[in-house]
Amino acid sequence: MPTTADTDLRFDTGRVHRRIDEAAARDGVARDVAIRTVTGEVPAGRIGSAEELAELVVFLASRRAAFLTGATVQIDGGSSRGLF
C-alpha cells in the first residue's frame, strides 16, 4: 500500500518539482532521470497533473455525482493493485 509520501509524488505540484530537483542534485543525475525514477512504479509512466486531480474533485462535488455513493476512486495512474 502506498504511503502518503508515495501518493504525494504522483501529482505534478510545486512540492514535487522541488523534490525531483533535489533528488537530481543529490544523486548527480539529470532531471529527466530523476523523473523516471519517481514514475517508475506508475504504470501510466508519468506524474498526474494537478488539473487531473482538481477535475475529479470538482466532479465529485458537483450535482453530476449526486447518485455516486460509497465509492473509492483511484486516481494514481494505475499504481493501485486491485482485484480487477
Image (spheres, rainbow, N blue to C red):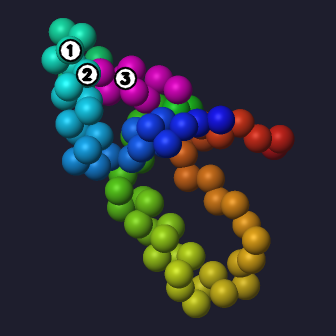
- How would you rate the neighbour count of disc 1 (Cα within 10 Å): few for under 14, some for 14-19, many for 20 or more? few
Residue 35 shows up from this direction: yes
Residues tagged 1 and 2 counted as in contact (Cβ below 8 A): yes
Name the image quarter holding the C terminus.
Answer: top right
Which range is magenta? 34-41
Is 60 situated left or right of 73 in this image? left
Q: Nearer the viewer, mark 3 or mark 2?
A: 2
Classified by dominant secondary structure, the portion drawn in magenta counts as: helix
Depicted 13 relative to depicted 36: above or below: below
Q: Earlier in the sequence, mark 1 or mark 3?
A: 1
- The residue singled out by tag 3 in the image is 36
Identified by mark 3, the residue type is Arg
Q: Position of residue 5 (x, y in %)?
A: 44, 37
Residue to which mark 1 is pinned: 26
Q: CA distance from mark 3 to mark 2?
A: 11 Å
Disc 1 is placed on an element classified as helix
Residue 71: x percent and y percent? 73, 67
Quarter of the image with the N terminus is top right
Q: Which residue is mark 2?
A: 23
Question: Under tag 2, what secondary structure?
Answer: helix
